């Protein structure tokens, strides 16, 4: 009986996590879609909107991770909701790949390679900047 109860609790916990990820993903995806509507990119043009969205998302995840791991203990569902759901839906590796393919098809292989490299560098730098800046702000503010 105890084992059945524990399995049921695990299933409920996983369903809650799945639900908050789904809600967060819907919100993040809508924000990503809105960015594309606000700043549309021609199929053969350099995909500045996708690059910007991914950079902003990485900056935010850097801030978020410092806050939930070093500042306070977050609710167990906050990280899956915001990190996996909202930011996972907002940032977009699939669009990144499609953008590269579009540039190649438009005979812009150089731009495709630049975009490939720049996105990785900018995303990692943005996450690091978010983390470092958040820590500095927290140290400056003090306890």
Image: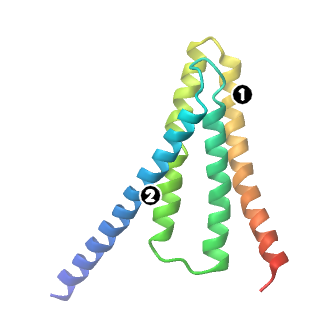
Coloration of the structure image: rainbow
Q: Can you say which quadrant of the picture contains the C terminus?
A: bottom right
SS for tag 1?
helix
- Examine the image and state in which quarter residue 65 appears: bottom right
The residue identified by callout 2 is 24
Q: Residue furthest right?
A: 140
- Percent across and percent down for residue 19 are 34, 62
What residue is shown at x 56% (from left), y 27% (from top)? 99
Left or right, 3 with reference to 16: left
Helix or strand or loop: what does disc 2 sit on?
Answer: helix
Residue ID at (46%, 64%): 80
Residue 97 picture quarter = top right
Residue 118 x/y as whole percent: 72, 35
Q: Residue 58 vs residue 101: left or right?
A: right
Against 84, residue 47 (above or below) is: above
Of mark 2 and mark 1, the one earlier in the sequence is: 2
Q: Residue at x 52, y 28 (%)?
A: 98
Q: Is 64 left or right of 16, judged from the image as shown? A: right
Q: Quadrant of the N terminus?
A: bottom left
């Amino acid at each position: 009986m105890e084992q059945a109860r524990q399995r049921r609790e695990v299933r409920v916990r996983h369903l809650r996590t799945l639900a908050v990820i789904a809600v967060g993903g819907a919100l993040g995806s809508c924000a990503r879609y809105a960015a594309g509507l606000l700043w549309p990119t021609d199929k053969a043009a350099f995909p500045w909107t996708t690059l910007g969205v991914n950079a902003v998302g990485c900056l935010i995840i850097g801030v978020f991770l410092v806050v939930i791991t070093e500042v306070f203990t977050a609710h167990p569902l906050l990280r899956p909701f915001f990190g996996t759901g909202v930011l996972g839906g907002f940032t977009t590796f699939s669009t990144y790949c499609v953008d590269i393919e579009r540039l190649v098809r438009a005979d812009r292989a150089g731009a495709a390679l630049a975009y490939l490299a720049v996105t990785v560098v900018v995303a990692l730098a943005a996450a690091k900047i978010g983390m470092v800046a958040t820590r500095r702000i927290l140290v400056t503010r003090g306890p």
